[in-house]
Amino acid sequence: MSGLGMVTGFNLVLLDVGIIVALTALFAWIVNLILRGVMRASNPQVAVAMRRLGVAVVVAVGAVLAVQELGVSPSILLLVIGLVAVAAIVAIRVPLENAGARFFSGIYSPFKVGDTIRVAGQAGRVIEINAMTTILLSEDDRMIALPNSTFLGQPVENLSPQAWKELVVPVTLTGSTDLAAFESRMLKSLSKLRLRLDPRFPPVFTVKSRSVQGADLVLTVMVRRPEDREPVLAEVNFRVSEELVHVRQSAPKPPDPSEPPSGS
Amino acid sequence: MPKLRILVNTQTPLVQFLRVPRDTRTTAEPSSVDLTQLTEGVDYRFSPGGVTRMVYPLLRKLLADGVLEDAHWVSLNPNAPATAHLPGISLHHVAIDPARMAGYGTTKEAIWATAHGLVSKAKSEGLFWTDDATEYTFYNRTTAMRIRELDHDLDFDLFYIHDFQQLPVGQMLGTLKPKIFRWHIPFDVRSIPVDWRPVMQRYLSAYDRIVVSSDRYRRELERLGHRGDVLRIYPYIDPAEYRTRPAAAEVDAVCEKFGILRAHSVGLIVARMDPTKGQDRALAALALVKNSLPNLRLVFVGNGSFSSSKGGLGLSKSDRWRARLDEEAHRAGISDRVVFTGHVTQAELDALYERSDFSILPSVNEGFGLVVVESWIHRRPALVTDRAGVAELITDGENGLLFDPDSATGLARQIRRIAADDGALRRRLVDGGRRAARTCSLETAARQERELFESLVGG
């Protein structure tokens, strides 16, 4: 094959790779949109995690196809990734299980730090929930560390008075979000649900952590009746998701470097 | 104890700018100004009100005593440079959108009126669910974020948050560092709507100490269900700031300015123009004694607050109240017996105290009532509403005369009592008042505040 032919063939490969990358980006965007629509009433953190997972799968498939198009066998790449993943899972199975349980129990388990709970024959006040364990302080001043995985496999009793009223929704804001404006809009939005909420406890946001990357908040709402828990939680999740979309769409765009700065 | 870096937060700023200083080279408004380079009364003035009048002398004293390394003061001041500097004290100004200011103002006025018993509990229920209340939250969140930014750069030792407008700030700060909240207005759990109580408890519990102005408020906080530490520190003033013996010529000039004659007997009421200050109660009592005391004149000193001032939040209600007082005086036929001075300078106020025969604090409800202490410092007997925090320092007939502000006859009786005195009662009230004033001195309070700081930061 002549040199010109090789160059042309290589260009075609690059074109194919480019098309694969573009299609991957398009599919990832579509999957993101679909998941956002499907999971509107889900917990915002779970919805974000699922969207990230969906996008990651699409990107991974796209990457394998692109590598294959470049003439490299994807089998070795897949084998290496697979072996590393298996080794990691075997090596840190227990911590992973607990961390995973922490993620889901943090969102779905009906207790928080400060509550008094009973689980797996142990009872006490929750004084810490970390990535691996949940620590209880018993009435006789004993510290009891329970692996987080316990809470996915055991019935948990929350003994705190009127614990059923409380719904806790974690919310993550990006660094560019105006926290005060977001909070103000959310409180206005949630006041529309007042009939379903305990009139003595207006919704409240608590900032758990804050950095230049963003802020982790917790939204606490108190329902008026036990049967309102599920519909109110879905509605609150929906409203938070909507507001996050609004915030993202109304966020100031980064300056276009091709344009001269204003005032110059 | 090492020198502390303290963050103070009040709604009312220490200074209001009468004209926004401009950078002479660029004509742009500077983001930071040095107040020592500006002229008080021309470029700026100190805000009226008890909170700022207490906090500023305290900070200066604690700086002078070496307790503080420096102080940073965050407040709402939409018409001011972002920062201003005094020796040892940096003022940081928060501004919020005027559209949000209205909602914030409505909410905080509702809280204030409810705490003072001016509106029914039923009318105040549901306040924290209103759209206006979201602006109250917005303001407090904006303030808390500003304080967090400053703390990131300056690493404060202590946060001292003042008054009900700022109550949520402690919870919003989310810091483990010591936080003190000072409650300045009246606190009676019976006036607090049931649906406010959990909200208030949540916010109050975010603080390491609550400071109140009377033992009564401490008991009321316990009745609310607050289980945290509550400390009573009486409000205070610095006697050195007052000229208790102004020159006769100054007194004559002020009397001439306000039409006060030598033959007149003068009762002085120093309070901003506001319904809760009870100026109407004093007018009602005057109407009852106008025939028996024809030479008695009541002199009302004061105008609006920061909130109602044009340079402040623009929530004017003082003008409406003043107009109503004029109407009531006219209706009672005592228009020629009253003088409304509006705002006066400190020198004029000292001269008016010197000219007065007694002072009256007729408030319907009053967090404390520092003007009573001012009156004591000026050696003038004080007639005091029994609904003021300062009333717990008063024994009737010993260091003051107490009355129920809802009883015009009660106040009229005390006015007649002091007017009929042959001198013995006056001497007893003046001497007793001066002794009580020491309890409310800057010196006493600075010691208590220093001990409070040490208990939180470590001695």
Image: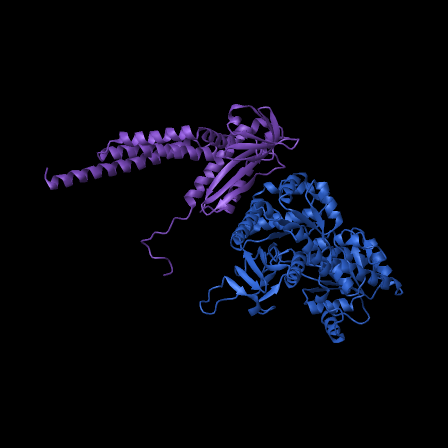
Can residue A223 be seen from the camera position used here? Answer: no
Residue A128: percent from the left, percent from the top?
Answer: 56, 35
Can residue A67 be seen from the camera position used here? Answer: yes
Residue A191: percent from the left, percent from the top?
Answer: 56, 38
Name which quarter of the figure residue B349 lies in.
bottom right
B427 or B178, which is in the foreground? B178
Residue B114: percent from the left, percent from the top?
Answer: 68, 46
Residue B381: percent from the left, percent from the top?
Answer: 81, 62
B457 or B264, which is in the foreground? B457
Give the farthest residue toward the bottom.
B249
Q: Residue at x 34, y 35 (%)?
A: A28
Q: Residue at x 65, y 41 (%)?
A: B201
Horizontal side of B253 relative to A147 (left or right) equals right
Name which quarter of the figure residue B376 lies in.
bottom right
* Above or below for B129 versus B336: above
- Identify the image quadrant of the N terminus of chain B: bottom right
* Above or below for B188 versus B373: above
Name which quarter of the figure residue B64 lies in.
bottom right
Chain the render paints purple: A
A122 or B346, which is in the foreground? A122
Give the farthest residue toward the left.
A2
Horizontal side of B418 relative to B330 (left or right) equals right
* Above or below for A27 versus B326: above
A36 or A138, which is in the foreground? A138
Horizontal side of A81 relative to B243 (left or right) equals left
Chain the render paints blue: B
* Colour mapping: by chain
Q: How many marks?
A: 0
Q: Residue at x 71, y 57 (%)?
A: B447
